[in-house]
Amino acid sequence: MKIIKNPSPNFGSRSEGTDIEFIILHYTAMSTENSLERLCDPVYEVSCHYLIDPSGICYQLVDDSKRAWHAGKSYWRGYVDLNSRSLGIELVNSGNENYPEAQMKSLIRLLKYLIGSFKLNPKNVLGHSDIAPSRKLDPGKWFNWKKLSANGVGLFPEVSTPIECDKKIFLAQAERAGFNPNTYFEHILMTFRNRCRPNFTGEFDGYDCALMQKFADAFDIDDSSNSQ
């Protein structure tokens, strides 16, 4: 796929002894022009490796080998410096609209390329909200995780029956998956529903629990993303 170079000065070196294990997805909440300007402005100290606009045009801002500044304060499976272990992809989207087909196709092509290049597990394609549920919503409820899963570049758990569960068990399963154990229940539930049940607004139920259990099971299959 064609990738346009648009270098950002906002990057550093990855921490010694770290490998790229994760890909973190974001939305920009601003236009393509404003996004590129912000991500390349040294005043803001924020960047990403790739940005994809609504028409599917893909820009590379930071070399894969470098540490871009996109994850911020975050946590996943014991890791807190997610910037050193990840690639960041920004999608031009307001956070309140569907992601265009052309943009999703470009994202899927990019993810296939990166997953193949770095031998990543597709389950390690995460949303910013997964690693920072107390402060981030992106890529949000309009993002189609099911499409990523269908193309082998993401994880979208599906269940047919609910299970008996309570908030304590739900949080225990969330921690087993990788979520920060110090996060409020409400924040994790919102993040998880945006990913797995974006159109459901009812009370916490057994489907939430069944989905979280299946999600956690996927991360316990092997040790590829266990904590340090």
Image (tube, helix red, strand yellow):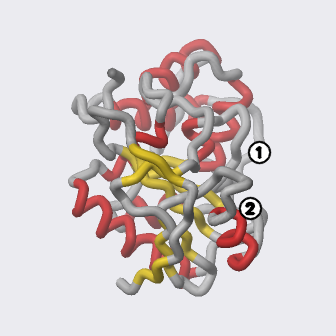
From the viewer's perspective, is residue 101 above or below residue 164? Answer: below
Residue at image mark 2:
95
Q: Nearer the viewer, residue 65 or 224?
A: 65
Is residue 145 at least partly visible in the picture?
Answer: yes
Residue appearing at x 67%, y 54% in the figure: 140
Q: CA distance from mark 1 to mark 2?
A: 18 Å
Q: Nearer the viewer, residue 206 or 217?
A: 217
Q: Quadrant for the N terminus, please.
A: bottom left
Residue appearing at x 77%, y 68% in the figure: 30
Q: Quadrant of residue 171?
A: top right
From the viewer's perspective, is residue 184 above or below residue 38? Answer: above
Which amino acid type is marked by label 1?
Thr
Q: Position of residue 131 (x, y in %)?
A: 55, 37
Q: Nearer the viewer, residue 30 or 49?
A: 49
Q: Position of residue 154 (x, y in %)?
A: 40, 55
Q: State how many labels appear.
A: 2
The secondary element bearing badge 1 is classed as loop
Q: Position of residue 23 (x, y in %)?
A: 43, 52
Residue at image mark 1:
201
Q: Position of residue 198 (x, y in %)?
A: 66, 53
174 to the left or right of 113: right
Q: Quadrant for the C terminus, please.
A: top left
Residue appearing at x 70%, y 21% in the figure: 184
The secondary element bearing badge 2 is classed as loop
